[in-house]
Image (cartoon, rainbow, N blue to C red):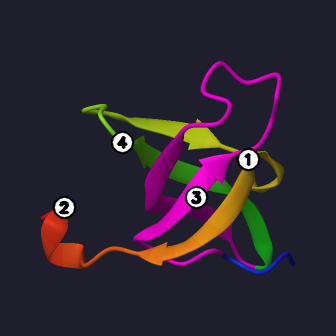
Amino acid sequence: MAETIGFFQEVEICNADHEHYGKRGVILGISEEGERLFGYAILIHGMKTTTYFEPTDLAVTGTEFPREQFY
């Protein structure tokens, strides 16, 4: 299984074919079952809803936000 990116980690959308390419957001949801990772729900900065991304669409920026910033 690919290594799971943790909750509240900031990521950048690195898939050039995606409409949100180059934007950054924060992981608020992880879709996985058993040993299989399906993807992530990302709250893109400046948006009010999450968007689903596959793991290969994302690059970790190294920034982690506090949980309290979202709940």
On residue 64, which mark appears? none
Image location of residue 29, percent across then percent down: 45, 59
Q: Quadrant of the C terminus?
A: bottom left
Q: Residue at x 68, y 77 (%)?
A: 4
Instruction: Determine whether label 1 and label 3 are within 8 Å by CB.
Output: no
Residue assigned mark 2: 70
Dot 1 or dot 3: first in sequence order is: 3
Dot 2 or dot 4: first in sequence order is: 4
Mark 2, Cα crowd under 10 Å, few <14 / some 14-19 / many 20+, is few
Image location of residue 13, percent across then percent down: 66, 43
From mark 2 to mark 3, how far is it between C-alphas? Answer: 16 Å
Amino acid type shown at disc 2: Phe
- Residue 23 vs 26, above or below: the answer is above
Which quadrant of the structure image shows residue 7?
bottom left
Q: Is residue 49 left or right of residue 68?
A: right
Observer-side mark, 1 or 3, equals 3
Dot 1 or dot 2: first in sequence order is: 1
Residue assigned mark 1: 54
| Count of picture labels | 4
Residue stretch in magenta: 5-34
Residue assigned mark 4: 45
Residue 32 counted in the magenta span: yes
Residue assigned mark 3: 11
From mark 2 to mark 4, how far is it between C-alphas? Answer: 12 Å
Dot 2 or dot 3: first in sequence order is: 3
Amino acid type shown at disc 4: His
Q: Is residue 28 left or right of residue 14?
A: left
